[in-house]
C-alpha cells in the first residue's frame, strides 16, 4: 500500500479561511465532545434515577411508566433516536413551535438534540442498573425504615439510594465511558464533535490515517479523564462495607 | 545420489513437463505484459468497481437495485476496455458502494480497483491517487424555493445555508462567509439526501452544490417545480475516475476509453440520455443543457484540475 504520510498537514491553516489549524479543529471537536458527554451524562443520571426509583415503587402505575420508558428507549437503535429527535420531532410539534426550533442557530439545534437523544437513551440503561441495585438490597431495610417512621421519599433519600449508588458505581463508570463514545453518533446529524471533525479532516486533507489516529488519541484521553474523575468520586464517597468489595 | 530412470520414465517426465509448460505459457506471457491493477484483475478473474448509491444522475440505484447513471455508463465502457486488455471476456465484476469518506482508502488498500462517480479532481487528492481524463464539468451554484427571494450569493446574508460536508462548495461558502462578513449560518450535511431534506424541511433557505447534482436532487423532491437553481457559479470543477497512484497502465486504459467516448459522439449520447430525457426513479427530465465547459471537454479530452484553464 503506497500511502503518503504527512503529519505536518495538521499544523496547516484550514482551507476554509477561518483562523485555525487542522489541529485546532480537533481541539474544538474535543471540547464539544467533552461538553456533550458531560451534559448528556447529567441528564441520563437524573432520568435514570427518577425512572429507576419508579420501577421499584409499590403502585402499578409508576412501575408501568418506568417500564415503558425503558422498553421504548433501550430498544430503539441510538442512531434512529437521533434522527427522530432531529428530523421528526420538529415536524410533529405545532407549526409555529417547529419553525422556531428550525430557525435556531444550527449548532445549538445539533447540540440540544444530541443531549436529548444521548441522555434519554443512556438514562434507560442507568434506570435498569439502579432498579437491579435497589432490588438487590435486603428487603428488611425497607421494612425497618418504614417501621422507624421514614416516609417513602426519606427512605429512598437516606437509606436506599446512598447504598445503591455506591454499589453500582462500577457499571455507572462504564456507562459514562460508553456515553462519551456514543456521542460520536451526533456527527450524523451534523454536530462537529470529534468524529465530525475526523470526517471533515479527511475531506479537507485527504490524509485519513493521520486524522483518525489523532481523533482516536483524543477519545482515549477523554476516557482516561473520565476514569480519573470516577475513581476520584469512588474514593471521596467510600465507606467501609458499602462499596460491594 | 541421482536415481536411475528408465528411458520410458524419462520420456514420460519430459512429455509431462512439456505439456505443463504449454499449458501455462500463454498465461505467463500475458502476465508478464500486465502490471499493477490489470495484473491483479487478470489473476483474480474479478474486477471490483466502486459506485455511489444516491448521486442522481451520475451513479445511483434503479428499482432493481442495479447501479445506473451517467458515470456508470462510462464505467461500463471502461469495463469493456479492461476485458479486452486482459483478454478475459467472462471477467467477473463486483460492484461495491462507496462514500466520499472511504473512497480513497478503499482504493489504496485494494478493496476497489477504480471508481468513476462524482469525485472532483483536486490537488490534495492527487497526493494519494491518480485521476483519469475528466468525465464531467460542473459549476457550484444554489438551489432555493422559488419564493425565497434568493437570486444570487449576495442574497445569502444572514441566512442559513446547507452544503455537503467536505465538498468544494463548503470551502467556497465558508470562505465567502469569512471574507465578505456575510454572517451566514452554514449547515454541513453528510450527504446529498440529508442536504435536500434540510432544505425541504425549511431548516435552510438555500443549498449550495454542484449544479448537475442540484438538478438531480430537485428531481427527487416531492415538488420539484417549486425549486430553482440560481446564482453565478462560484467555481468550475472536473469529475475524474480514480485509479491507484503510479499505476500508469490502468490510467492509460481509462484515459483512452474516456477520450475515445468523448470525441466519438458516444459521450454526447450518454449526456442526452441522463440530462435531457426522462430518467428513473420518477421519470423526470433534468433538462440540464450541456455547458460550454462540457462542450470544450468533449472536444478536447483532458485531465486538468482547473477546467477554466483551457
Image (cartoon, coloured by chain):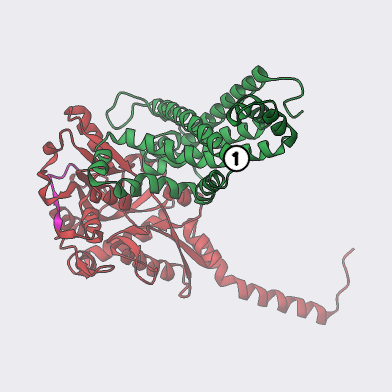
Chain colours: A green, B red
Mark 1 lies on residue: A57
Q: Indicate whether B159 appears above or below B17.
A: above
Which of the 4 quarters of the picture holds residue B75? bottom left
Q: Pinpoint residue B217: horizontal percent, then vertical percent.
A: 25, 56
Which residue is drawn at the image coordinates 38% and 55% (left, top)? B251
Decide which of B110, A123 is in the foreground and name it.
A123
Residue A8 in sight in this render:
no
Q: Would residue A43 be counted in the magenta stretch? A: no
Given the current orientation, which residue lies at the most extreme top position?
A236
Decide which of B183, A229 is in the foreground and name it.
A229
Q: Pinpoint residue B115: horizontal percent, then vertical percent.
A: 39, 57
Residue B8 in sight in this render:
yes
- The region drawn magenta spans B226-236
Q: Pinpoint residue A184: horizontal percent, then vertical percent.
A: 47, 39
Decide which of A40, B40 is in the foreground and name it.
A40
Q: Would residue B235 be counted in the magenta stretch? A: yes
Given the current orientation, which residue lies at the most extreme bottom position?
B8
Amino acid at each position: 500500500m503506497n500511502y503518503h504520510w504527512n503529519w505536518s498537514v495538521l499544523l496547516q491553516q484550514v482551507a476554509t479561511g477561518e483562523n485555525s489549524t487542522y489541529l485546532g479543529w480537533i481541539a474544538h471537536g474535543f471540547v464539544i465532545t467533552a461538553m456533550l458527554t458531560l451534559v448528556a451524562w447529567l441528564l441520563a443520571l437524573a432520568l435514570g434515577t427518577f425512572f429507576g426509583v419508579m420501577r421499584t415503587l409499590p403502585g402499578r402505575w409508576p412501575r408501568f411508566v418506568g417500564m415503558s420508558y425503558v422498553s421504548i428507549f433501550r430498544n430503539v437503535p441510538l442512531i434512529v433516536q437521533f434522527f427522530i429527535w432531529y428530523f421528526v420531532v420538529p415536524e410533529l410539534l405545532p407549526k409555529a413551535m417547529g419553525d422556531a426550533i428550525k430557525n435556531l442557530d444550527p449548532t445549538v439545534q445539533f447540540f440540544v438534540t444530541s443531549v436529548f437523544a444521548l441522555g434519554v437513551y443512556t438514562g434507560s440503561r442507568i434506570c435498569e442498573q439502579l432498579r437491579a441495585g435497589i432490588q438487590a438490597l435486603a428487603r428488611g431495610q425497607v421494612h425497618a425504615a418504614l417501621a422507624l417512621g421514614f416516609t417513602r421519599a426519606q427512605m429512598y433519600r437516606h437509606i436506599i439510594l446512598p447504598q445503591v449508588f455506591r454499589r453500582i458505581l462500577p457499571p455507572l463508570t462504564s456507562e459514562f465511558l460508553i456515553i462519551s463514545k456514543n456521542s460520536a453518533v451526533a456527527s450524523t446529524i451534523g454536530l462537529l464533535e470529534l468524529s465530525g471533525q475526523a470526517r471533515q479532516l479527511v475531506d479537507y486533507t485527504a490524509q485519513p490515517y493521520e486524522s483518525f489516529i489523532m481523533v482516536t488519541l483524543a477519545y482515549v484521553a477523554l476516557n482516561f479523564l473520565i476514569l480519573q474523575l470516577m475513581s476520584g468520586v469512588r474514593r471521596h464517597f467510600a465507606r467501609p462495607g458499602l462499596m460491594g468489595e | 545420489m541421482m536415481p536411475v530412470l528408465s528411458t520410458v520414465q524419462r520420456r514420460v517426465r519430459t512429455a509431462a513437463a512439456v505439456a505443463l509448460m504449454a499449458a501455462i505459457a500463454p498465461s505467463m506471457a500475458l502476465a508478464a505484459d500486465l502490471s499493477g491493477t490489470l495484473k491483479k484483475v487478470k489473476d483474480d478473474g474479478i474486477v471490483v468497481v466502486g459506485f455511489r448509491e444516491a448521486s442522481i444522475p451520475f451513479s445511483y440505484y434503479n428499482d432493481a437495485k442495479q447501479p445506473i447513471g451517467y458515470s456508470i455508463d462510462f464505467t461500463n465502457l471502461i469495463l469493456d476496455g479492461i476485458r479486452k486488455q486482459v483478454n478475459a471476456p467472462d471477467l467477473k465484476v463486483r460492484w461495491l458502494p462507496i462514500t466520499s469518506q472511504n473512497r480513497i482508502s478503499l482504493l489504496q488498500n485494494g478493496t476497489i480497483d477504480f471508481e468513476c462517480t462524482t469525485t472532483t479532481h483536486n490537488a490534495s487528492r492527487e497526493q494519494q491517487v491518480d485521476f483519469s481524463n475528466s468525465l464531467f464539468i460542473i459549476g457550484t451554484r444554489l438551489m432555493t424555493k422559488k419564493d425565497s427571494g434568493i437570486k444570487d450569493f449576495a442574497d445569502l446574508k444572514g441566512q442559513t445555508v446547507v452544503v455537503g460536508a467536505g465538498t468544494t462548495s463548503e470551502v467556497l461558502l465558508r470562505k465567502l462567509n469569512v471574507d465578505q462578513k456575510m454572517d451566514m449560518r452554514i449547515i454541513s450535511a453528510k450527504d446529498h439526501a440529508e442536504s435536500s431534506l434540510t432544505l425541504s424541511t425549511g431548516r435552510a433557505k438555500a443549498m449550495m452544490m454542484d449544479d448537475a447534482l442540484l438538478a438531480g436532487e430537485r428531481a427527487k423532491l416531492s415538488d420539484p417545480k417549486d425549486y430553482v437553481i440560481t446564482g453565478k457559479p462560484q467555481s468550475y470543477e472536473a469529475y475524474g475516475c480514480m485509479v491507484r497512484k503510479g499505476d500508469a497502465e490502468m490510467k492509460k486504459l481509462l484515459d483512452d476509453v474516456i477520450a475515445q467516448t468523448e470525441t466519438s459522439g458516444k459521450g454526447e449520447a450518454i449526456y442526452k440520455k441522463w440530462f435531457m430525457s426522462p430518467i428513473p426513479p420518477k421519470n423526470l427530465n433534468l433538462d440540464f443543457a450541456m455547458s460550454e465547459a462540457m462542450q470544450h471537454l468533449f472536444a478536447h479530452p483532458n485531465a486538468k484540475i482547473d477546467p477554466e484553464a483551457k
